[in-house]
Image: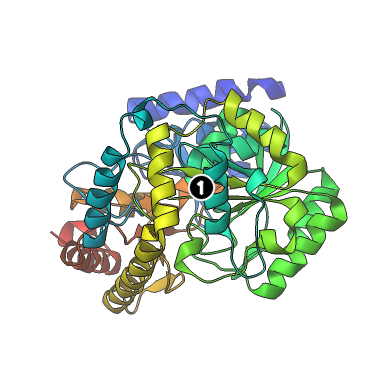
Amino acid sequence: MRASDYRTVADAVAGEIASGRLRPGDRLPPQRDFAYARGIAVSTASRVYAELGRRGLVTGEVGRGTFVRSEPGQAVRLQPEPPPAAIDLQRTHSRLPEQEVVLAETLAALAGAGAEIGFSQYGPAGTPRARRVAADFLARDGYAPRAADILFTGNGRQALAAALAALAAPGERIGCEPLTYPAVRGIAARLGITLVPLAMDAEGVCPDALLQAHRATPLSGVYLQPTLQNPLGATMGTARRADLAGILDTVGLTAIEDAVYGFLADAQPLASLAPDRTILVDSLSKRVMPALTVGLIAGPPHLTDRLAASVRQGAWTALGLSLAAGMHWMSGGSAATLAEAKRRDAASRQTLAREILGGLTVVGDPRAYHLWLALPETWRAEAFAAAALRRGIALLPAAAFAVHPGHAPNAVRLALATPSPEDLSEALTTLRRLALSEDDQIVE
C-alpha cells in the first residue's frame, strides 16, 4: 500500500465509528497490532491514527492508548462553549461585585465624553496618549516598554494572532509548551503555522528543550506563558527566565510572552530580561472584564512596524469605545484595583478547591484561577468530562490543551473563576464523588 493511502484506511475506521461498530470509549489496538491486522506498515498505521486524531474521531492518552472520542468530531472545535445551564468550569472570566461598580462608573464617564468616541476609528497604534497610558500601565520594576512600541488590538487573542503572524509564515514552526492555551492551537492552524511542543517541568519550558528543537529544525519563534501557565499553572523562577532569555539572545530567536495572567502574581517579565527578543502580549479581559476589553502588544523596536502591519492586515485593531474604556481603566486606577480584588478572589477559590478535592492529585499555583486535576486510573479524561456535563458541570479534558492530542495526559482542567462560591463548592463536591467512583452511574 502506498503511504498516501493512509487516508483510505482512516476513512474505513471513520466508517466503523459512524456505523457504531466502534463506539465512544472503545480502545483502538496498539499501532503495531493495527498495522498487522490491516496489512499495512507501522509507519502507515501511525499516519492513520494521526489523521483520525486530526478529524476529531479519536484521542490518545499517555500510557493508556488511543480511544474513540466520547463526542466524535469534537476536536475540530477550538473550545466548545458550555451549555447555558451548566456550571461553567471552562472559562476563567471572574465576575466580582467590584466589576459592576467599575462598569457603571466607566459607562457614565464615557457618556460624558460625548458621541465622538462612537465614531472614532484607530489604527494599531491607537493614539499617542493611549500609547503612553499603556506603556506606564505595563511598566514594573526592571521593565519599561517604550510608548512608541505599544500597539492595540480588539482582545488578547487578536494580539496573539498578530504576533504569531508577524513571526512565522505559513509552513514555519513556533515552539510552545506541550499543553497550551487552546486558542493558540486554533490560531496557528488557521495561519498554517506548525506548533512544536517543547518539554517542560514544574517551572515551564526547559531551556535545553528549546535549544535542541531550534538546532534540529530552526524555529521562527516560541510562544511562552511564563506566569501561571494555562493549563498547568506553572510559573518560571528568575533563574529559568534568565536561562531562556540567554538562549533567545544567543540564537536570535523571538519569544511571544503571554502575560494575560500576570496580574495575579508578581513576577519579572521575560521581556525585562530579553527586551530585544520578546513580544509581550497582555489584555484587559481577565483583569477587568471580557465584554469591553483591549489587547496590548509591547514588542522590540525593530519589530513594531511588522507587528503593526500584522494587526492591520488581520483587521484586529481595537474599537474606539473599547480603547477609550481601556485608557480610563488603566489611567484611573480601576484596573489595578480590580486586579487586587481578583488576587484575593483567586486565592480564596484555590483554597476552597484544594480542601474539597483533598486526596485527589491536583497541580497548579495557589494564585491562579485554574487547577489541573489528574484522574484516577478508573477514568478517561473525555469520559469524565462527558459524565460531568451530564451533571451540569462543563470542564475541559487534557486533549483540549495538547499540541499533539494523541499525547494528552489523563487529566482535566478546572476553571474556578466564573461560578458563584456556592455553585463552585457544589460542582467541586460532585466532581470529587465522580472521580472517586468507578462507575459514574452510581453518582446520581
- Name the residue located 68 percent from the left edge and 54 percent from the top edge: 198
Image vertical order of residue 251 relative to residue 240, above or below: above
Q: Is residue 1 visible?
A: no
- Quarter holding the N terminus is top right
- Which x, y percent locates residue 390? 20, 48
Q: Is residue 173 visible?
A: yes
Image vertical order of residue 278 relative to residue 98, above or below: above
Q: What amino acid type is highlighted by mark number 1?
A: Gly
Q: Is residue 132 left or right of residue 342?
A: right
**Residue bearing the label numbered 1:** 60
Image vertical order of residue 140 relative to residue 325, above or below: below
- Name the residue located 43 percent from the left edge and 59 percent from the top edge: 411
- Which x, y percent locates residue 302? 78, 42
- Which x, y percent locates residue 114? 31, 33
Q: Nearer the viewer, residue 369 or 407?
A: 369
Which element type, helix, strand or loop, lies under badge 1?
strand
